Image (tube, grey):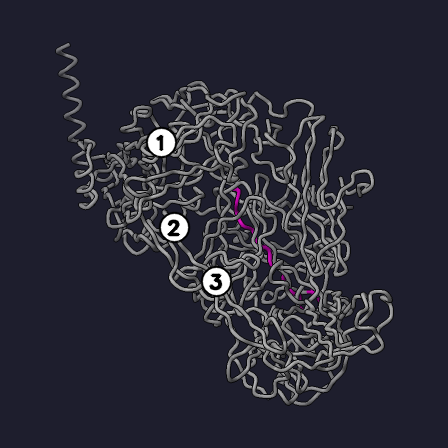
Amino acid sequence: MWNGDYERLEAIRFYYRERVCARPTAMEARTTDWVAPADTGEVVHSSLEKGFWCVNNEQPRGRVCSNYHVRFQCPPGSSAYVFTKWGPWGRWGTCSATCGGGRRIRRRTCARSSETVQCTGRPAEIQKCGRSPCPGTVRRIQAVNICVCVCVFVLMSLEPKVIRALTDAKGQFRITGICSASSGAISIRKEKFAPITVSAANNGTGLSWVRAVLRSAEKPYVVKHPEDKVRYEGGRVMMCCKATGSPPPDKYYWYHNGTLLDRKLYKYEEDLVLWSLKPEQSGQYYCKTSSSAGSIKSSPALLTVIGQPSCNSTPEMHLIRLPMDCVQPGTDSMHYNTGRCLHNKCAGSLDFDMRCRDEAGFCCGVKDMESRVINCGSYILPIRAVTQCSCQKCLQPTVLVRGRVVTADNGEPLRFGHIYIGKERAGTTGYQGGFTLQIPPDTQRLVVNFVDPTEKFLDTPKVFILDKRGGSIYHDVKVMRKKAPIDINAGETNSINLGEINGEDPIGQLVIPPNSFHKENGEIYEGTVKASVTFIDPRNITTAAAAPGDLNFVDGEGDMLPLRTYGMFSVDFRDESNKEVLGAGAVQVLLDTQHVKMPEHIPKMKLWSLNPDTGVWEEESDFSYTTTTAGGHGRSKREERTFLIGNMEIRERRLFNLDVPENRRCYVKVRAYMSDKFLSSEQLEGVVITLINLEPKPGFSSNPRAWGRFDSVITGSNGACLPAFCDAQRPDAYTAYVTAMMGGEELEAAPSSPKMNPNIIGVSQPYLDKIDYQRSDHDDPALKKTAFKINLAKPNQNNFDETNGPIYPYQNALSCENAPIDANHFRFFRVEKDKYEYNVIPFEENDLTTWMGDYLSWWPNPQEFRACFIKVKIHGQKEVMVRSRNLGGTHRETKGKLYGLRDIRSTRDMREANTSAACLEFKCSGMLFDQAEVDRSIISVLPQGNCRKTNTNSLLQEYLIKHPPVAPNNDTHGFTMLAPVDPLGHNYGIYTVTDQNPRVAKEIAIGRCFDGTSDGFSREMKTDSGVALTFSCPERKINRESLFQRLQNNPSQTLAQMGRSMRDNSAKSMSG
């Protein structure tokens, strides 16, 4: 067996077909880090007829081949797939001048399949602007999106504390008595803007002018975080950090295990270099950077310094579950130890160790395996077990984010919406709102902005969590529909309510003074304004999923901390005639204090705006008190009410938030399982757990309709810890609503009715009563079972019953993360019938790094997973277990050898009596791991019990006949075929899905199989469509009546039978 990297042309044609021409004229290969093969020092082979390959055994000094990509050049006029398409025009840029004539530019990008083809047309358009004449002796200041800057301080750099001038209402200023030929620079400052220093231009007339553009101040934001590294003692390492902001950060500080490193000793700036490493230098490193706008800390990176190899050559124990009918003689065990290598980082042989990101990380992986046989009594099972581990190049899994974007009110999809990561266009949603994004593996915080080009929905930035081990995480994204615009007069005072819920008062108001609206060039707007203000009301829990950002802010020390919201709003003001976006100054925000249920929150309330590039909320202003007389909803008379007032300017940011920082925090421990048996060995990883903090009513009793915050975390090997607000004085001061989702499928929570069972819920008494756990169907069995609600009672550390989870104080985060399986925790589980999977080459689908390259691997390609299912219909009163037995069929290395087994119990069709169906997985045909040759795997479908095949899909049967060899099908109790090579569809009863994550591929295929379509999704079995095989499985009639029962039911016949039997026995004894 030759391990390495194989990019065979035959395999590429198999998977990409029309994308590769018949006779390529050239080929280029690069590593995933874009390094040419000649620069890697590796021994490689290439051929235009065969492709490109690299063999591990041929490499010097035990090196392992890099992961390569190849591309082919096709001759002109070839039939390879070629396309060109212009993307949409971007927004117009800022005018190059505010007076005297300027220009502005907008651009578009060309999407093309090859560098050799071009889109027809121009990539940029230029438009004239700024045509008004310039005053000859006036110095002018321009601010981004607001050209008029009032009360701007103008200072000379030689005397930075002396204010020489203030700008007027038009943003203009004049300084007299200063020589125009002076070399002194002018410093210009304004609150909430980044300061700027400019030099005056001498035009020889004794007069000088300056033009300055002020940009809104933005807190620093880390764009490059330090990464985990492993080094040998005596080696060296470089940690890198990079931040952006306005103004740009000018100071960097590095910390080791929370202790500031001496800048003079280590001589660092953005990058930290450590020489002659010692074991005591192991630990966590992070950087902190600051500017005049604030500070930010990077994510911590772990440095491990080892004196000897950290990869234990002896594999650790790893038990796999055997089939239910596999009984090993002499033991009652249903498990077998296949061994596995602890997948920790190790120090490998780096070609260069002074990069910000190591070109290829090294991990403890499988070095040797051996073939064994498991005796199951009536049959045997082959298995490959790990016998030795060693330090190898880490498998680099593909990190994907996928999901669907729909409106929060009625589920209307965001069709062909634009997707931005930062300022770069990253993709487009599909017709049903679906999207898939491939994320760089070094991404620490992923901020994705969904923009509706039709402007029906709000532009919504989302902060997505990632699974760094690879595969994809599914996000069900909700966006808000824009409020219909109303007409308001720009010359009058205008008030717009925030929050419109029937029977309740608005949460607050926007008050816009007269003549506050202005155009992009700073000119006051005096006409009719189309005003749309959309409020995300926390009193409506259905809006929680549509909230933008992740409700965090950065404090003065650079730490990311949580906010608790009292409402968010988006503003959209436009010129009635040409729809130009308008800004507004001196806008007041009023918050009715009757909606603030916790009095201690009132003095801490602030107004925030969302930075759409970072997803972080930044402070706009504090609030002050005012009292006014108003008539509330349903009030018969006017009464005095108290409001909080905040002030803001509406510039380029359009999303605002009424929030308070909250320091009463805890962690909640949650685990997800494969079934309701809640076995420790069957925990699910990669499940997205979401916790929504619910807002209390007066008196701290919970209000199930209101929310204050939400958080999402992905489960790992030891579950997940979700941050939440909690209270030590009143158990129900804060409550939470918790859900779990995996690959678009909602998991069920542990039941709370008809009787509360601590062993099922996972939390012991009496803490369980204090938490008041209730599943969503607790009071109404007709409701869904996919969520639970709890009181967030902060644990009393002096009470032993509350020191073992599931709620942990915020300072005990490590206790929550490392909690043992028998500690208290909340539970979710997958709703599945009896199901079993057996692979000859063990593989954990929730951890792609456990993949091993072997001819008998169920999944031959760790970068692309192809799931195949066949729909089997059962006629019978009971549900039936159906098995697929999967053998190698045509490949010389696997012919007749077992890949694995799959068992699944059929699911009842609730619309049709005595009918069920099973969506049964089988081993797809295709290239094996070496990408050299196709294997047509042999699949046997075997229903368990008294079953007889009654029908085979005619299209499937015709396909198998036309694509020999044809497997014999003489047994009416089962069905055998050579698996199709082509991805057939529901018309054949075959469902094939390819994805970078095996679980997602299987979930999509199962959903289509249940639905009986090639593009639908259902969790209710539909047996009337998309079926491949039909079996009749009637119950066997068994008559086991006792003698007493027969005498009672039919005495004469029974006595006659007894007499005949006695005479026959007497005759036999006489003849003997």
Q: Nearer the viewer, mark 3 or mark 2?
A: 2
Amino acid type of the residue that numbered disc 1 sits on in the rendered structure = Ser
Q: Which residues are magenta?
A: 684-700
Query: Which of the labelled discs sits on residue 116, or is there none?
Result: 2
Query: Is residue 324 at least partly visible in the picture?
Result: no
Which one is in front, 259 or 73? 73
- Horizontally, is 1060 left or right of 143 in the view? left
Residue 731: % across, % down: 70, 57
Amino acid type of the residue that numbered disc 3 sits on in the rendered structure = His
Distance between mark 3 and mark 2 Cα atoms: 27 Å
In the image, residue 302 sits, relative to residue 898, either above or below, namely below
Residue 824: % across, % down: 63, 43
Query: Which of the labelled discs sits on residue 108, or is there none?
Result: none
Amino acid type of the residue that numbered disc 2 sits on in the rendered structure = Thr
Q: Which residue ends up furthest to the top in the rendered image?
A: 1072
- Earlier sequence position, callout 1 versus callout 3: 1
